[in-house]
Amino acid sequence: MSRPSDHIDSAPAPSGNGITQPKLGFVGTLRWFWRQLTSMRTALFLLLLLAIAAVPGSLVPQRSSDPNGVIQYFNDNPELAPVLDNIQAFDVYSSAWFSSIYLLLFVSLIGCVIPRTKHHLQALRAKPPKTPARLGRLAGFTTRTAPVGTDAATAVASARTVLKQGRYRVALFESPTEFSVSAERGYMRETGNLVFHSALVGLLIVVGFGSGFGFSGQRVLVEGQTFVNTLLAYDSFNPGRFFNDTELDPYTLTLDDFEVTYETQNLEAFGQPLDFTAGVTVTPRGGDAQDGAVRVNDPLRTGGTSIYLLGNGYAPTITVKDPEGTVVFTDSVPFLPQDANLTSLGIVKVPDGLAEQVGLIGFFYPTQDETSSGSYFSSFPDLEYPVLTLNVYQGDLGLDEGVPTSVYSLVTDDMEPLATRDSAIQPLELTPGETQELPNGLGSVTFENAAPDAAEGDYAGSVPRFASFDIHHDPTQGWVLLFAVLVLGGLLTSLFVPRRRLWVKAIEQADGSVRLEYAGLARGEDPALESAVTALADRHAAMLERATPAIKAADPA
Amino acid sequence: MNLNELSILSLYSAMAVYALAFIAFSIDLARRSAAVGSTEAAVGATNEAPASVAGAKASGGGSVSTLNRISSRMADDAVTPYGRSASLRVGVSLTVLGWALHLVAAVLRGLAADRVPWANMYEFAMTGTLLIVTVFLIVLTRTDLRFLGTFVTGMVVILLGIGALQYYVEVAPLPPALQSVWLVIHVFVASLGTGFFALGFALSFVQLLQSRREERAGTAKSSRLRFLATLPSAFTLENLAYRVNIIGFILWTFTLMAGSVWAERAWGRYWGWDTKEVWTFIIWVIYAGYIHARATRGWRGSRSAWLAIIGFAAVMFNFGIVNVFFKGLHAYSGL
Ligand code: HEM
């Protein structure tokens, strides 16, 4: 077996010690190095190293999975964080050191698998090896006496039949005094092992390249809004290295409604969401509109992309008018949820149309409630008693400097607070449908009621919701799955198919009787080997007896 | 009493019965030590036969059924044969009784919640330990591993105790993030794999003790854990541990893959090095290392046993520490 020389099955390598070893030379050194790299010991060492190297990434936040955690970490540990960053501790899984471990491991793996594959292909075509001279020392050694009237050649021929029925590959050998059959089975074990290891390589390659051909993008939609799958329509877009945006299929996606069900029966889980469903309409280019739904754990697959529902919240519709009543701003503004009962935070920026630039920081409470100290909170995530409070600032919004600013934050450093908790005028407070004057006669602000015709006190449809979608495209995912299945299949085959050799020998004794010997040899783990030898002996005996029914069989002990 | 309260009652009863089983198994270990003490006194220093599968006396009569032959070969190579023991039988019976109560507890919890009973830490602990005992009892029907009873019942009582006292939560419906068939498959297979790893851990642990004893057998120093002489040889224990661990490994491989499929459906990517994913991967690699170690010259025996032990420690860490204290997408411990 062409396994690495320190595999438990192979003959021990001649123990050279450093002093007496001849000079290797350049090629010799390379060869020596290669042999070291593809040895079992190195594979084991690299595997264990890989396990250890994976640990730090779970202790320190990673940029790939938790970018905000990294920022937080820098704030909390200003001394330590840059040091850790230097050793790529926030990018462990793409770091030079982590990558070099697994790349070495895979080089070792390839160097190991190729010669084994070659060797295995030969073994598949080769005859089972010659029967050992003495079987007595092998596993499950059993002797029987052939029924009277059976000669050695016949006995071995029938043993061969039994073995062939057991799907063994067989070869007959004979010498003047003895006949024997050598049998081997379980080539699938090594095949499985090689498939397993090769599929790991395949997996690494497709996973490594996979992200390069796809993209992921995010888009927030308020109920009623439509998105066209083009580059500019995304709020954020992360293309893979080899992705070409002409590949985008410009379908449209409309969020028709967003349904949430909350638990109201079980008091232990009161207010816990039970279901989020985004009812959408998808229209392929030049095709007919189709209704669909996107749910958590249940993405919508369309146009070569998968659409995932990642977040949701309220998007109060806010209208700002100047003192003459001209609308200067009106939009449904997604408010970011801050807690489980959807206390939400949103920003409105009004750069033009009023005497001053105006910024609003809004808090939205779907079911407003008050603590004993007078501060507001939301006590239920659904719209029972929605209230919007607005802090009003005037001054420079900072939009003109050409620096991109987030729509979800407002820098108030250079602004004058007009209505906040600390100013003379308290924050504005609105319920759906209500309008309030802005301070300083700047104009007015309205919290629009999306369902103005609803009954008094029924706020269920008063505020639109938004959903945030992740849209992904990964053309290699099918390959990943295929290799994963091969890994699992190879593993099962290689661990559960026994590879073994069995021998049956028939020796003519001086007294004319025929002595039968049976023994086996395991190649790898084979707990059932000995019972297989016994079973073979039993089946063989039964067959011989059937062949010589006239003569009563001798005691088969 | 509602279903959940019945479930709790049943669970506490199961814990009490397991505790009794633990006592019975411990008494058995003490008896074994005593039995070894008396034979050693009679025979003097025991002569250790180098155990080897090939060398085992296997040419016996063909009338014995195959299964018996395997299992008898497995457990038969103890230095000191150890006869029947009443406490051992009591221990097994109590374990079966405890298991039945445990099963009832899990089923009632599932009925009370109207879903599978493995969706938060309390339920993971309950179902995970149930599977540990299940695996143990199933393996018992094929191979005599009753000497692990103290370990299995002891561990299960401790884990259940922690689960019930620290992690208890009321019945709650599944949040949308967990509403998936993959919760049923992925978590169940992971727990089942854990059951096998637990048994493999115990076997590897006993293997280490045994090989220490075997090394010392020639010398004057004898092990204080005399009951070891009634257990299978280190060689046999290693083979048993390997067989149990590779089943665990296959289940774990499947867990990893099923988790990826689920992650793709839930989060839009099949792998993202989330903390829980990282630890699942680490465990997988450790056990791959263990399998390699078994096939590497110089690593068979005690060294590979240590890897199985480290692997199981990582499994426990993943369950007990990562779930509760680490931040990540898998925020479902329900705490
Ligand atoms: C990516 C890293 C690797 C992983 C995850 C891995 C994993 C495994 C697993 C799970 C098995 C047991 C299942 C089976 O027999 O198919 C195994 C067996 C084996 N591996 Fe690897 N392996 C890796 C790399 C290597 C390398 C680099 C070598 C060559 C030095 C190697 C040589 C072997 C051999 C010879 C066996 C058979 C063991 C036996 O006879 O029981 N593996 N490997």
Image (cartoon, coloured by chain):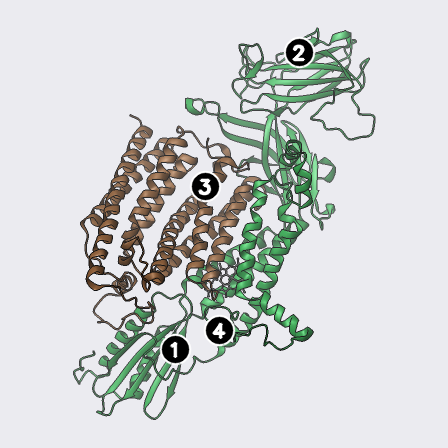
Chain colours: A green, B brown
Nearest-to-viewer mark from 1 and 3? 3
In this rendering, the answer to whether A356 lies above or below A493 is above
The residue indicated by pointer 1 is A183
| Residue at image point 40% right, 67% down | A498
Q: Is residue A88 left or right of residue A368?
A: right
Quadrant placement of the C terminus of chain A: bottom left
The residue indicated by pointer 4 is A12
The answer to whether dots 3 and 4 both sit on one chain is: no
Nearest-to-viewer mark from 1 and 2? 2
The residue indicated by pointer 2 is A421
**Amino acid at dot 2:** Arg
Q: Residues within 10 Å of mark 3 (few under 14, many from 20)?
A: many
Nearest-to-viewer mark from 3 and 4? 4
- The subunit letter for the residue under badge 2 reads A
The residue indicated by pointer 3 is B319
Instruction: Work out whether mark 1 precedes mark 4 in sequence or the reverse, and give the earlier one.
Output: 4
* Residue A26 % position (x, y): 69, 73
- The subunit letter for the residue under badge 4 reads A
Gap in Å between the C-alphas at discs 2 and 3?
A: 46 Å
